[in-house]
Image (tube, grey):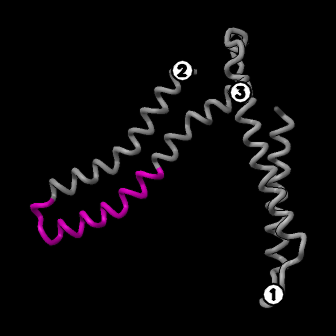
Amino acid sequence: MYFLVALMTVSLVGVIALGLYLELNPLRKGVSPPRWLKGTIGVNLITFAAAQVGLVAFGVQEVMAQAPAAEAAKEVSVGLGLALIGIGIPTALSSIGAALAVGPVGAAALAAIAEKPETFGRSLVYLGLAEGIAIYGLVLSILMLGKV
């Protein structure tokens, strides 16, 4: 498991190093990029994706392993840590989705209220519906937390 974490770290450091190299030595217009550039980026992305899939696979297996041993020691294993990160992902993504929904809805609601103040109630309902997306993600995370 630690090998996969190290592999992901090396892959990320490689992508960052490549980005710094390209920032310091930008490609000139009309000049084709070096042949190694596409291959390096592809290998880094494939390595990162494969290590991530491996971490998920081994992390699930470790979480499903004997729970009493982990509870007796009161330690957080790598698998449990990955499970807790996975539990937080629905809340994070639903909050981002709610933010993307509330922005345009709120702007349109303010414009509608400025023209017709009696539309305040309807616009509040639409804002509540957009914000409900985040609540669904939070409820899902709480339900998943109860299973760990």
Taking the spot 85% from the left edge, 42% from the top edge, the residue there is 6
Which quadrant of the view contains residue 135?
top left
Segment tinted magenta in the rendering: 96-119
Q: Is residue 92 left or right of residue 76?
A: left
- Distance of label 2 from label 1 (alpha carbons): 54 Å
Q: Is residue 68 left or right of residue 51?
A: left
Quadrant occupied by the C terminus: top right
Residue 127 spot, x, y in % from top left: 28, 53
Taking the spot 34% from the left edge, 48% from the top edge, the residue there is 131
Residue type (three-letter) at the residue carrying disc 2? Lys
- Distance of label 2 from label 3 (alpha carbons): 14 Å
Residue 72 spot, x, y in % from top left: 70, 9
Residue type (three-letter) at the residue carrying disc 1? Arg
Which quadrant of the view contains residue 13?
bottom right
Magenta stretch mostly in which secondary structure? Answer: helix
The residue pinned by badge 1 equals: 28
What number is the disc on residue 79?
Answer: 3
Residue 103 spot, x, y in % from top left: 37, 61
Residue type (three-letter) at the residue carrying disc 3? Gly
Taking the spot 72% from the left edge, 24% from the top edge, the residue there is 61
Which quadrant of the view contains residue 74?
top right
**Mark 3 surroundings within 10 Å by alpha-carbon count, few (fewer than 14), some (14 through 19), many (20 or more):** many
What number is the disc on residue 147?
Answer: 2
At numbered mark 2, what does the secondary structure look like: helix, strand or loop?
A: helix
At numbered mark 3, what does the secondary structure look like: helix, strand or loop?
A: helix
- Distance of label 3 from label 1 (alpha carbons): 46 Å
